[in-house]
Amino acid sequence: LLCSPRRRYNVWMGQGCDASLLLDGPNTEKTAPQNSGIFGYDFIDDIKSDLEAACPGVVSCADIIIAATRDAIALCGGPSYAVTLGRRDGMSSVSWMAGDLPSPHVDIPTAIGMFAKKGFNSFEMATLMGAHTVGVTHCSVIEDRLYNFNGTGKADPSMDPTYAWVLTTYACPKGQTFDNIVYLDDPSSILIFDRSYFNQIKSRRGVLPVDQALGIDPATSWMVEFFATTDFFPAMFAHSITKMAALEVKTGTAGEIRRNCRFTN
């Protein structure tokens, strides 16, 4: 659940940092198409079970996500940063809230607008997208980009032709029956949280349409160059994800501390 950056966006950019995505049930955020590829809920369940055995009713599911995300990033070689605790869990979850999540196919002006609604500027947005350095997607998400870009029957010309050939030959061959996983960064560094994602974009090897658009749109292309050629990404990422972790937090008497992250009390 926590290794992919998009999963962090999905957890926090819907109803805020209240663990609403973890709730089971019909028409919850978990059932929305945008969240269909999320896995790892059992990992959160195990942590919650251990905490409830040691100190029942104290640590919320929302705080588990915050702390586990920080630790996962650090274990991948990314920055370690201070986290504030004391969040409470939401008591509702509706699938339409997933509409606040940027699509992998979104253009940059629209993405900037979606992040702005949550209080993030374009530089913070580009920074958070850098977490795709440890991200994955599926062939079905990029099929049109590889085989029928804008109805042309060809690959997206903004993608490096050699890289497009590699993806269509090995990762996503035409006619495959299994929806393979595709790494959003160089496979040799997929478990390393570094700036290589931005170098991939510079080399026209962005996997998702929005990845490559980040390097093409004049509003953000300079940011790609900046992060690819400096050492500022870790510190800026720590700032941006800390800000994201403070989105629409529930404290005090709002919400509850769930006994089971999948259900309200």
Image (cartoon, helix red, strand yellow):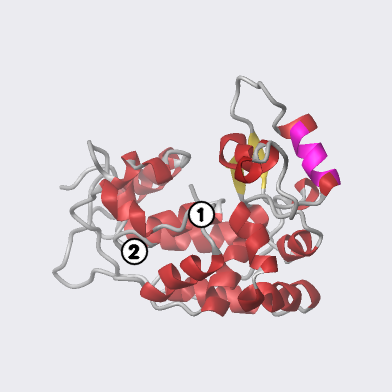
- Circle 1 or circle 2, nearest the eye: 1
Q: Residues within 10 Å of mark 2 (few under 14, many from 20)?
A: many
* Residue holding disc 2: 17
**Which structural element holds mark 2?**
loop
Can you give x and y, in whole percent of width and height, for residue 249 in the image?
Answer: 29, 70
Circle 2: residue type = Cys
**Which structural element holds mark 1?**
helix
- Taking 154 as reference, is 188 above or below it? below
- Residue at 41% from the left image edge and 57% from the top image edge: 101
In the drawing, does residue 121 fall left or right of residue 31? right
Can you give x and y, in whole percent of width and height, for residue 171 in the image?
Answer: 73, 33
Asked if residue 185 shows in the view, the reply is yes
Helix, strand or loop: magenta stretch: helix
Instruction: Work out which residue is located at the far right of the displayed protein and give it.
Output: 162
- Residue at 78% from the left image edge and 42% from the top image edge: 164
Does 164 lie within the magenta span? yes
In the drawing, does residue 101 fall left or right of residue 236? left
Question: Are circles 1 and 2 on residues that touch, CB within 8 Å?
Answer: no
Instruction: Work out which residue is located at the far front of the displayed protein and give it.
Output: 152
Can you give x and y, in whole percent of width and height, for residue 4 in the image?
Answer: 56, 51
* Residue holding disc 1: 6
Does 248 lie within the magenta span? no
- Span of residues in magenta: 162-168
Can you give x and y, in whole percent of width and height, for residue 234 in the image?
Answer: 66, 73
Q: How far apart are marks 1 and 2 (CA)?
A: 14 Å
